[in-house]
Image (spheres, helix red, strand yellow):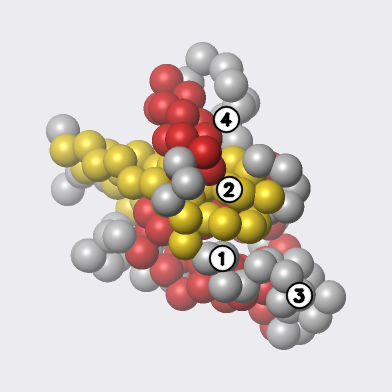
Amino acid sequence: MPQLIIYTDGSSRGNPGPGGYGAILQWGTAVKEISQGYTRTTNNRMEMMGVIAALESVTREGLDVTIYTDSAYIVNSVEKKWVFGWEKKGYAGKKNADLWARFLRSYRKHNVKFVWVKGHADNKYNNRCDILATQAADSGRYIEDVGFGKD
């Protein structure tokens, strides 16, 4: 069975400001790109939304998934298991609690590993995700980030 490979990136024009995410999902030879723009958000929220949207778009469960992201915030929070401690404490005092809870629901459906990649470097898929995210942030076709500002 092939492994699902996901690349993600997020962008915001101002922090906060309009933002967007981009993600690429690879399953064998099949490749899918997704992106979305938001009216008012932050860069970290868009980095997270790229991961969440990609995982939520997967219809099968129990897959081996490798996610490449340039967000040390996400990689460290998951790989160092900080997010699981935050969850046990009800995310008390943590920003983006709504997205961390949403992330964990999708994360737990698969065997997920994160890999940090340097942003704006030589990874063509990360660079493509950056383009998708910035185009979404600049598109003017936005939806509301309903959890923004509720921390």
Task: Give the residue type that dot 1 points to.
Answer: Asp
Task: Give the residue type that dot 4 points to.
Answer: Val
**Disc 4 designates what residue?**
117
Q: In the rendered view of the protein, which quadrant contains the C terminus?
A: bottom right
* Dot 1 alpha-carbon crowd within 10 angstroms: few under 14, some 14 to 19, many 20 or more: some
Q: Residue at x 73, y 52 (%)?
A: 16
**Disc 3 designates what residue?**
151
Task: Give the residue type that dot 3 points to.
Answer: Asp
Q: Residue at x 72, y 43 (%)?
A: 14
Alpha carbons under labels 3 and 4: distance apart: 28 Å
**Disc 2 designates what residue?**
19
Q: Secondary structure at mark 1?
A: loop
- Residue 35 seen by the camera: yes
Q: Secondary structure at mark 2?
A: strand
Q: Are marks 2 and 1 in contact (CB under 8 Å)?
A: yes
**Disc 1 designates what residue?**
145
> How far across and down, in percent of the image, does residue 77 sit?
68, 57
Residue situated in front as seen by the camera: 33 or 115? 33
> How far across and down, in percent of the image, does residue 83 sit?
67, 67
Give the mark nearest the N terminus, 3 or 4: 4
* Dot 2 alpha-carbon crowd within 10 angstroms: few under 14, some 14 to 19, many 20 or more: many
